[in-house]
Amino acid sequence: MDHLRREKENRERALETDNAELNEDVAQLRAEMAAVIHQTQNIINTKPGLELEIAAYRKLLENEERRSAKHSLEKTDDTERCIAT
């Protein structure tokens, strides 16, 4: 009977140890998940600002391309007038 009682106590200790390890694992995973959520939130918060910045640069580039194309056309017209004269 003592043998069974000791075996039961040993199993209970082993289960308590396993349970403690699992609780530590859960705590660590929760901390990692919180860090990932924080990083994700930072990315989500940063994205709109970057999109606005990209849109501004795109608009500047488009305006520069239009100005350059217009300047090029004016130069061509001036050259054709000089040749015609």
Image (cartoon, grey):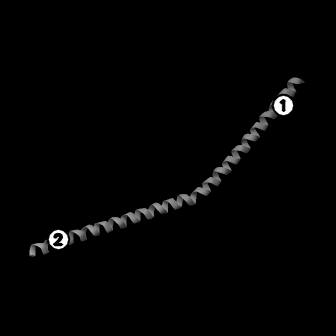
Is 69 on the left or on the right of 14, as rendered?
right
Residue at point 52% right, 61% down? 41
As drawn, the label of residue 10 is: 2
Which x, y percent locates residue 40? 50, 59
Picture layout, residue 61 above or below residue 43: above
Quadrant assignment, res 28? bottom left
Under mark 2, the amino acid is: Asn
Quadrant assignment, res 81? top right
Is 61 on the left or on the right of 75, as rendered?
left
Instruction: Give the alpha-carbon distance from disc 2 to disc 1, as whole Å.
Output: 98 Å
Q: Earlier in the sequence, mark 2 or mark 1?
A: 2
Under mark 1, the amino acid is: Asp
Q: Secondary structure at mark 1?
A: helix
Residue at point 31% right, 66% down? 22
Which x, y percent locates residue 23? 32, 68
Residue at point 76% right, 37% down? 69
Quadrant assignment, res 31? bottom left
Looking at the rendered image, the quarter that the C terminus falls into is: top right
Picture layout, residue 33 above or below residue 6: above
Q: Nearer the viewer, residue 77 or 4?
A: 4
Q: Secondary structure at mark 2?
A: helix
Please rate how many residues cluster around mark 2, counting C-alpha atoms within 10 Å: few if below 14, some from 14 to 19, many from 20. few
Which x, y percent locates residue 15? 24, 69
Is 12 on the left or on the right of 53, as rendered?
left
Q: Which residue position is annotated with label 1?
A: 77
Give the farthest residue toward the right. 85
Front: mark 2 or 1: 2
Which x, y percent locates residue 44? 55, 59
